[in-house]
Image (cartoon, helix red, strand yellow):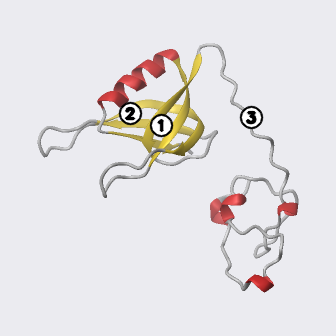
Amino acid sequence: RIARGALALRLVPERYAPPSALRDPAEAVGRRAGVPIAAGTDLDPALLTVPEEPREPVLRRGERALDLVAVGAAAPGARVDVLVTYAGRGDAPGATRLALADVQLLAARPAQAADGQDALPRIVATLRVTVHQAVALTAAAAAAAEVRLLARP
């Protein structure tokens, strides 16, 4: 798979750019190379494998897809930990707890803009959870000041 760190953006005049080269590095991130690609090569879609058609995730018996608004970023299919930070009393910082560990992220999309200038960008994360985990995580998120996703290696 092509990692973001393996890519570089090179600015060239339009007339010198290969017509079929990818214009945005995000188009290649996560895709697989179909052939060996030398460093410095302009990425052309012909060098990459054909992506699989996106398909709906299959939930097993007892699993649910839970939508959760959170701060963080991860690619669908990644495993994440869910941290919940509660509001503190007065000026004291609130406690942060691990609400759920090693859960699969099925999908992610931008959430509506948060209120305030200092608000962090949020996503709507769809997580694969059990019914028990969905109930516990929903209760924790309802009482939280912030919910954060941490991508696992």
Classify mark 2: residues with Cα within 10 Å, few (<14), some (14-19) or many (20+). Answer: few
Residue at figure coordinates x 66%, y 74% from the top left? 9
In this rendering, would 83 be left or right of 58?
A: left
Q: Position of residue 25 (x, y in %)?
A: 68, 65
Q: Residue pushed farthest left?
A: 90
Along the viewing direction, whichever of 23 and 130 lies nearer the viewer: 23
Classify mark 3: residues with Cα within 10 Å, few (<14), some (14-19) or many (20+). Answer: few
In this rendering, would 88 be left or right of 131?
A: left
- Vertical order, 99 against 90 (above or below): above
Residue hosting label 1? 81
Residue hosting label 2? 98
Say which amino acid is labelled 2: Leu
Classify mark 1: residues with Cα within 10 Å, few (<14), some (14-19) or many (20+). Answer: some
Residue hosting label 3? 55
Residue at figure coordinates x 83%, y 69% from the top left? 20
Along the viewing direction, whichever of 24 and 38 lies nearer the viewer: 24
Q: Secondary structure at mark 1?
A: strand
Along the viewing direction, whichever of 81 and 31 lies nearer the viewer: 31
Q: Residue pushed farthest top?
A: 61
Give the spatial CA distance, label 1 vs label 2: 7 Å
Q: Position of residue 53 (x, y in %)?
A: 80, 41
Of pointers 1 and 2, the one earlier in the residue sequence: 1
Give the spatial CA distance, label 3 vs label 2: 30 Å
Q: Secondary structure at mark 3?
A: loop
Say which amino acid is labelled 3: Arg
Residue at figure coordinates x 71%, y 84% from the top left? 12
Give the quarter of the image for residue 26.
Answer: bottom right
Do callouts 1 and 2 mark residues in contact (Cβ within 8 Å)?
yes
